[in-house]
């Protein structure tokens, strides 16, 4: 199996890479987000008098045999990156109950979470204030029933390809605690949308460009962003669709493993991405004269290359990205940037049989890799590096420090670097269930990505707000965004 993996990895990605040791101290300019245990977990309204259904929104529930009512705010549906307030009324004083959440993704995979609670002296339960006593998580976690969802089938990852349809979430309240909770007291169904009301989706087939464009409601023009994912390929729209709900025109751009695009990452031509930039700047709904870039993993180093070599890029955000060109040679006009040297023989296999690629990537500062380093000093705009400090795919923190030192050595502005402890490689929008290990879409093997669920979930909420703030500031001239209540 190892030989088969090495063969497929070499054919698809072309050698991997290792990195030098992460710095032990935090240099100036690096923001270490040691998120407090209460971060994003408290609502704006402090605890006080009994919950009023008019205050929380129209109850949306089915009562089964008792007067207990499950109350959600918003009531029937909400956007995926928005928090949902969950409360129960009509319980007995201090009654022990178990809350369960479940959903099926568009592939039919089942995800579940549960937590044990105890009602207060009034027979009420508000997840804003009430700590979970155990289950899929513990403590005061108002959105825990969503971010703690785990796949019924091991190593599963929540998939959302068709953003036009919502994800239905089933919520249940049962009497008692484990080992077997009692009868069903009440239940509710809540739909989680990926398109805010008024957001429009346009499928893009312009020249060679294969993408989906998401436009906010209104006349525009809107600040434009190109969104790139990593080495799994395909067209990933969910992050772009959610970001469009915050006032941006976002192009989810595929670059391999989609329709007539290349099947493998053998050679990458920057002219393709230049076409995407031109498409955005010529679109009547996109605000000229520049756009922003958002990239994750391999998509991150592509964004760094775009910012360094292409015109009209004002702001760049990368999530757990390398500062060198990785996986395949990058071509632009008469120039070739080689891929970072890698060694697939250094793949580690855990006791559980999971693959860890951390040590396969070589140090970008080694002389043999100098041609692979991306010349960030040529970029026109600022950078934001989002870093998971438990990233097990590669040394993202080290890469961000290389970028910072290189920029400053050339008299450029120091980039903003936000480091999140306990956070792995795959940083998604808020409330996506984190996964430490998952099967890679191309390699077909279980790969270690890292991250501790609670810390990773909090990081996703904060990073999402930081990304919006950065783009509003540098594309729209705004200094801040409305923060989540959680």
Image (cartoon, rainbow, N blue to C red):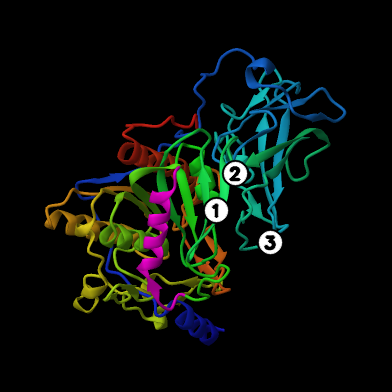
Q: CA distance from mark 3 to mark 1?
A: 24 Å
**Mark on residue 237?**
1
373 is within the stretch colored magenta: no
Q: Which mark is residue 194?
A: 2
Q: Is residue 423 visible?
A: no
Q: Earlier in the sequence, mark 2 or mark 3?
A: 3
For mark 1, does the 10 Å Cα neighbourhood hold few (<14), some (14 to 19), or many (20 or more) residues? many
Q: Quadrant of residue 117?
A: top right
Say whether residue 281 is magenta. yes
Q: Is residue 77 above or below residue 415?
A: above
Q: Position of residue 431 (x, y in %)?
A: 55, 43
Q: Residue at x 37, y 52 (%)?
A: 293
Cα–Cα span, label 2 and label 3: 24 Å
Gap in Å between the C-alphas at discs 1 and 2? 9 Å
Q: Main secondary structure of the magenta part?
A: helix
Q: Residues within 10 Å of mark 3 (few under 14, many from 20)?
A: few
Residue at 68% over, 25% down: 119
Q: Which SS class for mark 1?
A: loop
Q: Which residue is mark 3?
A: 153
Could you say where residue 259 lies in the image, as x and y percent from the top left? 58, 68
Q: Which residues are magenta?
A: 265-284
Pick the residue in front: 215 or 42. Answer: 215
């Amino acid at each position: 199996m190892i030989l088969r993996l090495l063969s497929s990895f070499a054919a698809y990605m072309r050698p991997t890479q290792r990195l030098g040791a992460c710095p032990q101290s935090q240099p100036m300019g690096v923001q270490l987000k040691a998120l407090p245990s209460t971060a994003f977990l408290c609502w704006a309204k402090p605890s006080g008098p009994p919950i009023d259904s008019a205050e929380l929104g129209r109850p949306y529930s089915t009562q089964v045999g008792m007067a207990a009512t499950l109350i959600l705010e918003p009531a029937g549906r909400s956007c995926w990156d928005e928090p949902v307030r969950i409360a129960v009324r009509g319980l007995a004083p201090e009654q022990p109950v178990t809350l369960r959440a479940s959903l099926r993704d568009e592939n039919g995979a089942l995800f579940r979470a549960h937590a044990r609670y105890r009602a207060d002296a009034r027979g009420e339960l508000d997840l804003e204030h009430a700590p979970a006593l155990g289950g899929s998580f513990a403590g005061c976690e108002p959105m825990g029933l969503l971010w703690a969802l785990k796949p019924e089938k091991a190593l599963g990852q929540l998939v959302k390809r068709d953003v036009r349809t919502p994800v239905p979430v089933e919520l249940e309240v049962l009497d008692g605690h484990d080992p077997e909770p009692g009868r069903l007291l009440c239940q509710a169904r809540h739909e989680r949308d990926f398109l805010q009301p008024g957001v429009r989706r346009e499928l893009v087939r312009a020249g060679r460009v294969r993408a989906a464009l998401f436009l906010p409601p209104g006349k525009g023009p809107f600040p434009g962003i190109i969104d790139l994912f990593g080495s799994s390929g395909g067209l990933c729209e969910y992050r772009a669709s959610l970001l469009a709900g915050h006032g941006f025109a976002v192009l989810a751009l595929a670059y391999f493993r989609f329709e007539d695009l290349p099947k493998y990452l053998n050679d990458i031509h920057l002219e393709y991405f230049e076409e995407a930039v031109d498409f955005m700047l010529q679109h009547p709904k996109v605000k000229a004269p520049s756009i922003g870039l958002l990239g994750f993993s391999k998509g991150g180093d592509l964004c760094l290359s775009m910012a360094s070599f292409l015109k009209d890029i004002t702001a760049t955000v990368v999530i757990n990205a390398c500062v060198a060109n990785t996986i395949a040679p990058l071509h632009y006009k008469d120039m070739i940037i080689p891929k970072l040297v890698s060694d697939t023989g250094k793949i580690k296999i855990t006791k559980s049989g999971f693959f860890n690629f951390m040590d396969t990537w070589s140090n970008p500062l080694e002389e043999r890799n100098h041609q692979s380093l991306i010349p960030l000093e040529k970029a026109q705009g600022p950078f934001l590096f989002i870093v998971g400090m438990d990233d097990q795919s590669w040394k993202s923190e080290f890469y961000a420090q290389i970028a910072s030192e290189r920029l400053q050595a050339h008299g450029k502005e120091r980039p903003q670097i936000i480091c999140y402890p306990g956070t792995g490689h795959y940083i998604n929008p808020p409330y996506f269930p984190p996964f430490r290990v998952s099967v890679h879409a191309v390699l077909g093997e279980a790969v270690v990505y890292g991250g501790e669920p609670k810390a990773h979930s909090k990081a996703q909420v904060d990073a999402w707000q930081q990304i919006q703030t950065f783009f509003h500031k540098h594309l729209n001239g705004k200094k801040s965004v409305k923060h989540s209540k959680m």
